[in-house]
Image (tube, rainbow, N blue to C red):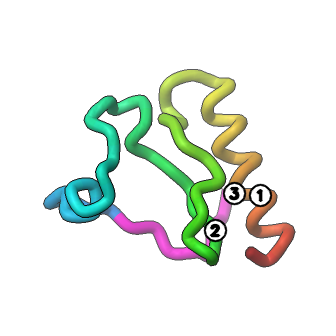
């Protein structure tokens, strides 16, 4: 999958602290749209279904131009 949108990795955890992101690793990955609305939350590496949901969320954003 080729993604032309930016991907950010917050190695210091600043975003997590400022936005109250869960400590549970199952809910630390998310996809947001251009309006900063969370459209997917989970862990794409957890299982095949999670990965498919993650891919679907990204594809929908790419198709809609959001």
- Name the outermost residue toward the right: 63
The one of 1 and 38 positioned closer to us in this rendering = 38
Q: Residue at x 54, y 43 (%)?
A: 41
In three-dimensional space, the C-alpha distance between marks 1 and 2, rounded to whole angstroms, equals 12 Å
Horizontal side of 49 relative to 19 (left or right) equals right
The Cα–Cα distance between marks 3 and 1, rounded to whole angstroms, is 4 Å
Location of residue 35 with respect to 61 vertically, above or below: below
Choose mark 1 or mark 2, whichever is in front: 2
Q: Which quadrant of the rendered structure holds the N terminus?
A: bottom right
Residue at 64% over, 44% down: 54
| Residues at circles 3 and 1 in contact by the CB criterion of under 8 Å | yes
What residue is shown with label 3? Answer: 58
Q: In the rendered structure, does residue 32 fall within the stretch colored magenta?
A: no
Q: Which residue does the image show at 49% across and 25% down from the upper left? A: 46
Query: Residue 38's image quarter?
Result: bottom right
Residue range in magenta is 1-8
The image shows residue 23 at horizontal and vertical percentages of: 26, 35
User: Would you name the residue on which mark 2 appears?
Assistant: 33
Residue drawn 77% across the image and 57% down it: 59
* Disc 2 element: loop
Task: Tell me: residue 21, above or below residue 33.
Answer: above
- Which residue is at the far left? 12
Residue 63 coordinates in the image, percent (x, y): 85, 68
Q: Compared with residue 4, is residue 24 higher up or lower down, i.e. above or below?
A: above
Q: Earlier in the sequence, mark 2 or mark 3?
A: 2
Q: Residues within 10 Å of mark 1 (few under 14, many from 20)?
A: some
- Residue holding disc 1: 59
**Pick the front one: 26 or 21:** 21
Q: Is residue 4 magenta?
A: yes
Disc with the residue nearer the chain's start (1 vs 2): 2
């Amino acid at each position: 999958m080729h993604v032309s949108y930016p991907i950010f990795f917050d190695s210091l955890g600043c975003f997590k602290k400022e936005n109250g992101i869960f400590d549970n690793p199952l809910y630390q990955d998310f996809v947001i749209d251009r309006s900063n609305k969370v459209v997917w939350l989970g862990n794409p590496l957890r299982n095949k279904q999670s990965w498919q949901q993650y891919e679907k969320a990204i594809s929908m954003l790419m198709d809609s131009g959001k």
